[in-house]
Image: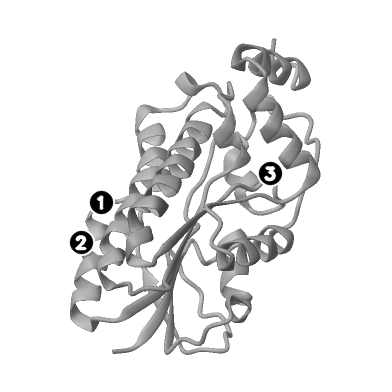
Amino acid sequence: MKKIAVITGASSGIGRRFAETIAQYGQSFDEVWLIARHPEALALPYPVKTVALDLSARESYAAYAALLAEEKPEIALLVNCAGYGKFCATTDLPLAQNLNMMDLNCGAVMAMCQESAPYMKPGARIINIASIAAYQPIPYINVYAATKAFVMYYSRALNRELKKRGITVTAVCPYWTKTKFFDRAVQKDEPRVVKKYVAMYTPEQIVSRAWRDAKRGRDVSKFGFIARGQMILTKLLPHSLVMSIWMKQQELD
C-alpha cells in the first residue's frame, strides 16, 4: 500500500507553497497527488501524480472516490487549499457564481475530507484553509467570509470526531496574503471594494506556520500579530460594531 499526500488547489498560491515545501512535514511519501483544474507537474522530492479535477463540480467527488478505490492508498496527509472569493455586493453577483463559490469553498472541503478519511491511519493529518474572515461577518465579501466560517467550524469539530482514530485536523486562518486570489476576487471595471489592507503576508509565512501548528496537533493556525489581534477583537466586540468599522475603513458607507 503506497503512502500518499493529497493537495488541492496546488497550482498557485498557498496550495502551491504547501506542495513546494512538503518536505517540511517531516514524513516521506511514495507519491504526492496534486489536484487542481489545471494542475502543474512541480519538481518535488517525491513522485508526483497530477489529477485534473474541478472541485466546484460535484461529479468530481465521485471521480476522486473512484481513483481512491482503484489505487487503495494510505493517505497520510490531506491539504485542502482550493477556493476563491469575490469582492462586491452579494446581489451583484449571479446566483450561479455565489453557489459555485459555496460548492468549492465548503462542499469540496467536506467531500475531500469524507472521501479521504477511510484511507487514513493513526498519525494522518488534514489541513484545511479557512481565513481570519471566518471570525466576522464582512459586507461586500459576504459569501466568501461565510464559507470560511463553515470551513473553520467544520474543521475544528471534525478534529474532535477523528481524534479517537488518531487523525488531526487543522484549520489554517490566513490574513490578507499575497497570491493570485486577488486577480479573481476584484471585479474588473468596477469601483474597488477593498481600499485598505492593514497587513499583507506571504504564502511562505502562512505555510511555514501551518506546518508547525499541524505537526503540533493544533486545530487552528494563525500567523501574524495583526491577524491575532483582529481575531481577539472580533470575539470581544459586537459584530454590528465590527461591520461598521469595516465599512468606514473601506469607505463603503
Q: Residues within 10 Å of mark 2 (few under 14, many from 20)?
A: few
From the top left corner, tell me how far across and down residue 5 is, in percent. 44, 76
Q: Quadrant of the N terminus?
A: bottom left
- Frontmost residue, 177 versus 96: 177
Look at the numbered disc 2 and give the secondary structure of its residue. Answer: helix
The residue beneath circle 2 is 62
Q: For the residue carrying disc 1, how many other residues have a C-alpha within 10 Å: few (<14), some (14-19), or many (20+)?
A: some
Report whether residue 192 is seen. Answer: no
Q: Nearer the viewer, mark 1 or mark 3?
A: 3
In this figure, which residue is indicated by the disc labeled 3?
A: 175
Label 1, label 3: how far apart the Cα atoms are: 29 Å
Residue type (three-letter) at the residue carrying disc 2: Ala
Q: CA distance from mark 1 to mark 2?
A: 8 Å
The quadrant in which residue 97 appears is top left
Q: Is residue 109 left or right of residue 111?
A: right
Disc 2/disc 3 C-alpha distance (Å) = 33 Å
- Tell me if residue 106 comes above or below residue 97 in the rendering: below
Q: Judge depth for marks 2 and 3 and give the one in front.
A: 3
The colour scheme used here is one colour
Residue 239 picture location, percent across and down: 60, 17
Total marks placed: 3
The residue drawn where x is 69% and y is 65% is 208
Tag 1: amino acid: Arg
Q: Which quadrant does the C terminus fall into?
A: top right
Give 252 or 244, whichever is nearer the viewer. 244
The image shows residue 72 at horizontal and vertical percentages of 23, 81
Residue 108 at x, y percent in the picture: 35, 52
Does 126 sit left or right of 103 as displayed? right
Q: Of the residues shown, which amino acid type is indicated by label 3?
A: Tyr
Check whether the beta carbons of the residues at disc 1 and disc 2 lie within 8 A of each other: yes
SS category of the residue bearing label 1: loop
State the residue position of label 1: 58
